[in-house]
Amino acid sequence: ALDRALAVTTAQWPGDMASVSGVLALAQGVGLPPATILRAEARALRDEAGTRARTRVSELTVKLTLPIGACVLPTFIVWGVVPVILSTFHSLTHS
């Protein structure tokens, strides 16, 4: 029954209840078991949430690249390149 399916689904549905009502009405109109359509709808919602999460992570890596590079590059130059240049210059002037 539509009322029982709505009551059972309300407690565990990851999306909004408007989509549940629409899915249940579709199931009743088509004559399919509501669980089949609800599972497919829940799977679609989880896939969509996963896609959004992966997109946000990708955007975050791009946004973090510049600040990390701005911190690491000067440090590398000061602690790695400058001593080599000074050592080379010192050995050339005292030879």
Image (cartoon, rainbow, N blue to C red):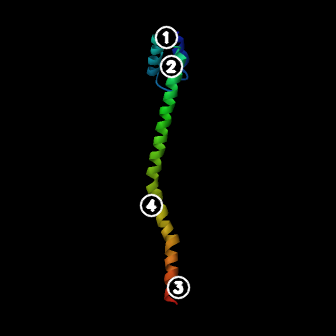
Give the residue at mark 2.
37
The residues bearing labels 3 and 1 have C-alpha atoms spaced at a distance of: 88 Å
Badge 1 marks a residue whose secondary structure is loop
Residue 89 bears which disc, if any?
A: none
Residue 70 bears which disc, if any?
A: 4
User: From what the image shows, is residue 46 above or below residue 71?
Assistant: above
Q: Nearer the viewer, mark 3 or mark 1?
A: 1
Residue located 46% across and 47% down the image: 60
Are the residues at dot 2 and dot 4 in contact (C-beta closer than 8 Å)?
A: no
In this view, the residue in front, 69 or 33, is 33
Q: Looking at the picture, how far across and down is residue 37, in whole percent?
A: 51, 19
Q: Nearer the viewer, mark 2 or mark 4?
A: 2
Give the residue at mark 3.
91
- Residue type highlighted by circle 1: Gly
Q: Nearer the viewer, mark 4 or mark 3?
A: 3
Give the residue at mark 1.
31
User: From what the image shows, is residue 17 above or below residue 65?
Assistant: above
Badge 3 marks a residue whose secondary structure is helix
Residue located 51% across and 31% down the image: 46
| Mark positioned earlier in the residue sequence (3 or 2) | 2
Q: For mark 2, does the 10 Å Cα neighbourhood hold few (<14), some (14 to 19), or many (20 or more) residues? A: some
Are the residues at dot 3 and dot 1 in contact (C-beta closer than 8 Å)?
A: no
| Mark positioned earlier in the residue sequence (2 or 1) | 1
Q: For mark 1, does the 10 Å Cα neighbourhood hold few (<14), some (14 to 19), or many (20 or more) residues? A: few
User: From what the image shows, is residue 45 above or below residue 25?
Assistant: below
Are the residues at dot 2 and dot 1 in contact (C-beta closer than 8 Å)?
A: no
Badge 4 marks a residue whose secondary structure is helix
| Mark positioned earlier in the residue sequence (4 or 1) | 1
The residues bearing labels 4 and 1 have C-alpha atoms spaced at a distance of: 61 Å
Q: Nearer the viewer, mark 3 or mark 2?
A: 2
Residue located 49% across and 77% down the image: 85
| Mark positioned earlier in the residue sequence (2 or 4) | 2
